Image: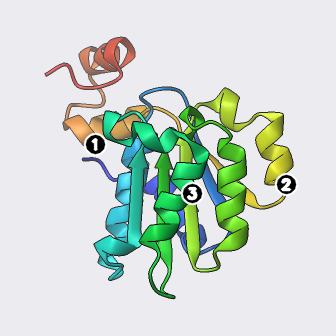
Amino acid sequence: MLKREMYLSRMRGFYDSDLVKILVGIRRCGKSVMLKQIMEELKERSVTEDHLIYINFELIEYEDLQNYKKLNQYIKEKIVDKKKYYVFLDEIQKVNKFEDIVNSLRASIDNLSIFVTGSNSRLLSNELSTVLSGRYVLFNIYPLSYKEFIELTGKDGKSDETFWDFVKWGRTSK
């Protein structure tokens, strides 16, 4: 997996912040990968697995948590001590009233750092910006750049064939 240092370097200073970290971008641009890379970095800083709460709302096993009250209860039950907890809510727009649950968690739990991903249109809606006014930081995530593509695939960056492969597929065609 390619470490997307350009984004991580911008986000590191916010890992422990009480600001909600919002990662937006088109489908398949790497938002979920970014969350996993952040979690790996937190583990390298000795954050234990039980202090990382990851929920991917595209997975069927989390379907019940699309109810904002159940999600709130689920997260609060996982917080059992005063150490910092990191909550990762992937594709949060699938949760009814997601703006309210994110704001409620942020406002009610001091030892919490919240990261959310989702589609641009829903996460940048008026409801979210109103509810979280001034309490979030936004990171736009884009698909792989040509430089990242070359780094990931190990292909010759000066080759026309490699360039057109990138234009056509945006990734390796292996």
**SS at badge 3:** helix
**x and y, in percent, of residue 12 in the image:** 52, 68
Q: CA distance from mark 2 to mark 3?
A: 20 Å
40 relative position to 74: left or right = left
Task: Place residue 58 in its image quadrant.
Answer: top left
Q: Is residue 93 visible?
A: yes
Up-down: is 172 above or below 89?
Answer: above
Q: Nearer the viewer, mark 3 or mark 1?
A: 3
Alpha carbon distance from label 3 to label 1: 40 Å
Seen from the viewer's position, the closer of residues 66 and 14 is 66
- Is residue 140 in view? no
Task: Give the mark, 2 or 1, whose residue is nearer the N terminus.
Answer: 2
Residue 122 is left or right of residue 132, and the answer is left
Q: Nearer the viewer, mark 2 or mark 1?
A: 2
Q: Nearer the viewer, residue 14 or 162?
A: 14
Q: Position of residue 124 (x, y in %)?
A: 73, 36
Mark 3 and mark 1 residues within 8 Å of each other at the beta carbon: no
- Residue type (three-letter) at the residue carrying disc 3: Asn
> Disc 1 residue type?
Glu
Mark 3: few/some/many CA within 10 Å (<14, 14-19, 20+): some
Colour convention of the picture? rainbow
| Residue 133's disc number | 2
Q: How busy is the neighbourhood of tag 2: few (under 14 within 10 Å), some, or many (20 plus)?
A: few
> Which one is earlier in the sequence, the residue at label 2 or at label 3?
3
Would you name the residue on which mark 3 appears?
72
Say which residue label 1 marks: 151
Q: Choose top left, top right, bottom left or bottom right for residue 135.
A: bottom right
